Amino acid sequence: MTGRFDHLPHRRAIVSRRALVEAAATLPGDDPATLRRGLSQLLREALDAGRAEIARRLAASPSRGLEAANAQAYLVDQLLIVLAEVTTQRLYPVHNPTAGERLLLIAVGGYGRGEMAPFSDVDIGFLTPGKQTPWAEQVIESMLYTLWDLGLKIGHSSRSLDEMVRQAKADVTVRTALLEGRYVWGDEALYADAAKRFHDDVRHGTERQFIADKLAERNARHVRMGDTRYVVEPNVKEGKGGLRDLHALFWIGKYVYDVQRAAELVDIGLFTRTEYRAFHRADNFLWAVRCHLHLIAGRAEDRLTFDYQREIAERMRYAARPGKPAVERFMQFYFLQAKAVGSLTGLFLAHLEERFAPKRRYGLPRLRRAPRKLHGFTVDGGRIALPDDEFLRADPVRLVELFALAAREAKEIHPLAMRAATRDAKLAATVRRDPRANAAFLELLAGDADPELALRWMNEAGVLGQFVPDFARVVAQMQFDMYHHYTVDEHTIRALGLLSRLEHGQLAEEHPLPSAVIEQIVSRRVLYVAVFLHDIAKGRGGDHSILGAEVAERLGPRFGLSPAETETVAWLVRHHLLMSATAFRRDLTDFKTILDFAEVVQSPERLRLLLVLTVVDIKAVGPGTWNGWKGQLLGDLYDRAEEVLRLGHKQKGRGERLLAKQDGLRAAMNWSEAELAAYAHRLPEAYWIAEPGDVLAHNAAFVARAGDALLSIDAQVYPERGATLVTVYAADHPGLFSRIAGAIHVAGGNIIDARIHTTRDGMALDNFLVQDPLGRPFDEAGQLERLKTAIEDALAGRGKLTDRLRAKPLPRARADAFRIEPNVLVDNKASNRFTVVEVAARDRPALLNQLAHALFLSKVTIHSAHVATYGERAVDVFYLTDLTGDKLAAGARQRALEKRLLAAAAGVQYDEAA
């Protein structure tokens, strides 16, 4: 019962129990209330001083997480012992205790294990031999009140021995907490009885069920936390690959084998010494992160969000490297530890499976059939296994073949085979140039089977990084932004899984165009290799598209691609962001945009490849990054570019397309030629080119309903676009667009696209596509009513729009963690008719309103606006002319425009005199 904290250096500097006992002896004891207050004050000061000492030690040695966690538990131990002794000896002394007036205080849960973060719950249990006596009730109640006075969050229970056994049998959570029960204070004989009863009456014979319960609990927790260890804001305690997964291994080992320390898992053969060192390293690191997290937050906080990551990286003394900030290096190490936890879990469970293999009836051992052979490997229990422990070392090409075989045969890999692959992973470096190894890898990557799971196993074993060292550089590489949800390696592997499902028709309903296009693709291998390599150069300190293309040129021939295939892969990696940037940031009704895009793409096959790569890349970023509007924009760009690539520059003339749209509108509205002519005369030619047919019909019906009204507002949900079309028909005046944009944001909407039109009789007809902050259609009745009211108020001048926008919270509360320098680009070459202005800035509610106001002050006409957001970053693009309809000439006026937009992007006042 002693020695749990003997390893802690200078324990008395944390807290001296002797000093506390001596100080408590001087407290006046005539009045119980006065004594309790004095004791609370004494313990509170000791708690604060102890926490400060532990925090100081952690700051001095920021990676010693287990020592900090142990020190916190030691501190609480000493306070509880002093509290219990003063309570039982001075507040409620009993001079001739009966056999029933015995009391035991135990630590349970994580505190029982001797590991606590600074603001962890203090989980304790009071045990009595039988029914609780009045004296025990008084002592327990008094102690709990004092602990609450200290500000500690107490988890407590009071049970007799029989109640302890009964509740532990009935509830696996209680059983787990008591499994780690540790003596703190009280009757030692009672503790010995409790330990024996728990072993004999609770644990014995229930090992198999406990394992099943803990694994089911773990799986449910993983699903709740997102079921991947590679989310960029992980939960250090509960997330996959976090502390709770390590605890679950220890709980099972302790329950089944009665180990008292994790190191004893080596003695019973569940871990090798190397694996235990990995266990200890991950445990120590994760505890360090959790302790820092609590100290920074000033409370119990286990989610490692962006706003904490940078500060913890600094506290733990991570330094920046070229192309990789300190925070990304810290998080990469975090994910490597989470990855190690996953590998250890698989090995641990494999041993348990062998130990608890089901028996035949009548208690006979399970008869094991001889494993069948499969390309030199064996199949054991339906899983690919090794015929002997030296099998991979004898021919390291088998390290690659193992995972290719798993994908082709759709079989799991036996955990002991995974252990051998992990152990021998470095040998994969010796066969990088081996044609057999590269052929097997290309089969894994681009064969008929879904490669996702096998590639993930290959990555977790460390074989993938050894075989493709460029990929090793992005393993566990996070991207410190709010757009990407996963690490680079996890994003890449998910993209390959999506590509396979797309090719096999499993996403046809959600993605009809790419599902149809992929059937026309001739260069399958090119597509799969390009998806594998598209982000491989991230974190190198340059443009990852350009650097990645160089990697592709080097790796293509090694993988067995022809020179033509390698060239196409390198082109796709170089331009893998081209299609999304064009579709989301440019006006697709401007023919120059299509021509410029087609000039880079050059062939229909490349266009098909680029579309599919773009779709799986966006979808693999994370939940919510794909929506119908993005799908429609990519589809529009694909259709228009395909027409140019098939027919050269020959396309339906502008006038011909305009007449076709007007004829379509006349049919939809059932108008006569005269009615169409009257309506068409009011609207400029650009309107007919810019708007799709369904919007033209909607606008026409809306304008007809509005009649002579000076302001009409309409909102219609477009499910296929994943957005709501908001149309404003109002008397035109300067600054109208900025007011409408501000009002939409005040109502809680995000503008993703805007087209601004002015009729020949002075009315504005503006169409906005609007989503809620989560990227969904803005479609609830209350939302739409609030939106209409906000626009009416803004245009009528009711209330100060600027103040209301300033009061709106950031759409992402943690965006302050990111530093984004505003940037403005003015381009007179991107369009034949307009000046294209692109503004990049940190996203915030007032941004579009402030940018539009800056354009109003610059006396320019906005013809369309296109809004793209990438997590915390917004990129807003405007198509402009001056008031005479010409492009903006370079010179002083253009420079003034840039300065106004930069000030608006930064959210500061522009000094006109500067």
Image: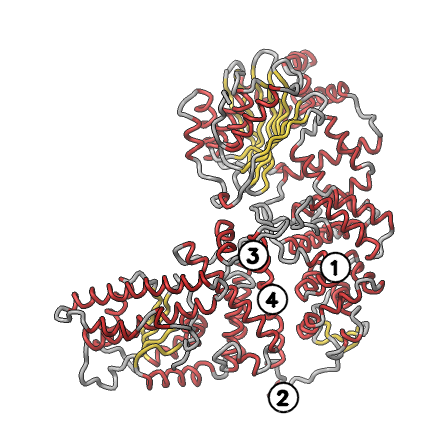
Badge 3 vs badge 1, beta-carbon distance below 8 Å = no
Kindly identify the amino acid type of the residue bearing the numbered disc 4.
Ala
Q: CA distance from mark 3 to mark 2?
A: 52 Å
Say which element carries label 3: helix
Residue 330's label in the rendered image is: 3
Q: Earlier in the sequence, mark 2 or mark 4?
A: 4
Q: Is residue 704 visible?
A: no
Tell me the crowding category of disc 2: few under 14, some 14 to 19, or many 20 or more residues within 10 angstroms, Cα based: few
The structure residue drawn at horizontal position 71% and vertical position 47%, both measured from the top left corner, is 508
Kindly identify the amino acid type of the residue bearing the numbered disc 3.
Phe
Badge 2 vs badge 4, beta-carbon distance below 8 Å = no
Tell me the crowding category of disc 1: few under 14, some 14 to 19, or many 20 or more residues within 10 angstroms, Cα based: some
Residue underneath mark 1: 468
How far across and down, in percent of the image, does residue 2 sit?
38, 81
How many labels were placed on the picture? 4
Q: Earlier in the sequence, mark 3 or mark 1?
A: 3
Kindly identify the amino acid type of the residue bearing the numbered disc 2.
Leu
Note whether 430 is above or below 653 in the view shown: below
Badge nearest the viewer, 2 or 1: 1
